[in-house]
């Protein structure tokens, strides 16, 4: 069964939403998509949508017109986020031993969290990110989360995992690690 991934835009010009067809919709698919797009941006820092298409096709992402009968998974990362100066978003995961409400969840680390949630200016800029969950709630480095389903006590969110397979190279991965540290998050080795 094929799936459709929709990528929105943050720029006032160019396509508002673009669609890609994939065979499988999994974290690895999104990591591969992000890695491919990051590689294009490395060689063409101001790439327009049509400049991504050859690389995406080589990696198995077929560009399709707006689908009418297939559900669309909207990717949390805009296709043109490289055009703004705040940096690029990436995904982090919480390990299984994290607090109950975060354990084994994948979140977006965004340098522009105000696109998703109300975030204080204190957390913006200076090469920092805020974690955003699937409900568009911000998860700050100093947050506490429920320890168990019984909601008896809370504890620190703990460390996150930064999957390297979403990055085009080691430098990007290291840059993301540095960004998480600047933002106050701790990384699991």
Image (cartoon, rainbow, N blue to C red):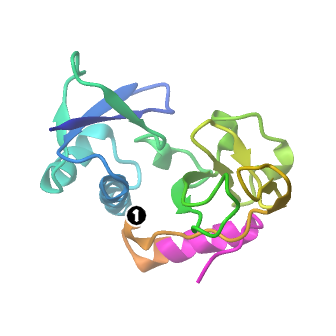
Asked if residue 176 is among those painted magenta in the image, a careful observer would answer yes
Question: Measuring 53% from the left and 69% from the top, which residue is drawn there?
Answer: 162
Name, please, the residue furthest toward the front. Answer: 150
Give the image location of residue 56, x and y in percent: 21, 50
- The answer to whether residue 11 is above or below residue 123 is above
Please tell me which residue is depicted at 51% across the width and 57% down the height of the picture.
90
The x and y percentages for residue 175 are 56, 72
**Is residue 26 rendered to the left or right of residue 88?**
left
Q: Nearer the viewer, residue 25 or 85?
A: 25
Percent of width and height locating residue 174: 54, 77
Residue 129 occupies quadrant:
bottom right
- Which image quadrant: the N terminus? top left
Q: Is residue 96 left or right of residue 81?
A: right
Tell me the crowding category of disc 1: few under 14, some 14 to 19, or many 20 or more residues within 10 angstroms, Cα based: many
Q: Pointer 1: what residue?
A: 166
Whether residue 15 appears in this view of the structure is: no
Quick one: SS at disc 1? helix
**Which residue in the rendered view is the most extreme toward the top?**
68
Give how far across and how far down residue 130 sits, in percent: 69, 52
Answer left or right for 14 relative to 125.
left
Q: Describe residue 60's horizontal placement relative to residue 75 as left or right.
A: left
Instruction: Give the residue at the far bottom of this rendering.
Output: 189
For the magenta stretch, what is the residue range?
173-189
What residue do we see at 84% from left, 42% from top?
A: 120
Asked if the magenta segment contains residue 19, the reply would be: no
């Amino acid at each position: 069964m094929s799936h459709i991934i929709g990528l929105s835009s943050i720029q006032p010009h160019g396509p508002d939403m673009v669609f890609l067809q994939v065979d499988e919709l999994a974290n690895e698919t999104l990591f591969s998509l992000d890695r491919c797009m990051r590689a294009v941006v490395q060689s063409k820092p101001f790439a327009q949508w049509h400049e991504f298409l050859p690389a995406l096709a080589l990696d198995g992402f077929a560009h399709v017109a707006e689908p009418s009968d297939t559900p669309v998974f909207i990717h949390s990362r805009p296709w043109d986020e490289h055009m703004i100066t705040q940096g690029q978003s990436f995904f982090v995961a919480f390990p299984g031993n994290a607090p109950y409400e975060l354990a084994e969840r994948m979140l977006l680390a965004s340098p522009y969290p105000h696109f998703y949630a109300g975030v204080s200016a204190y957390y913006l800029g200076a090469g920092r990110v805020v974690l955003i969950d699937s409900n568009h709630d911000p998860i700050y480095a100093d947050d506490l989360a429920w320890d168990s389903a019984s909601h008896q006590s809370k504890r620190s969110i703990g460390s996150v995992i930064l999957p390297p397979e979403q990055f085009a190279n080691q430098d990007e991965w290291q840059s993301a690690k540095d960004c998480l540290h600047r933002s106050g998050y701790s990384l699991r080795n």
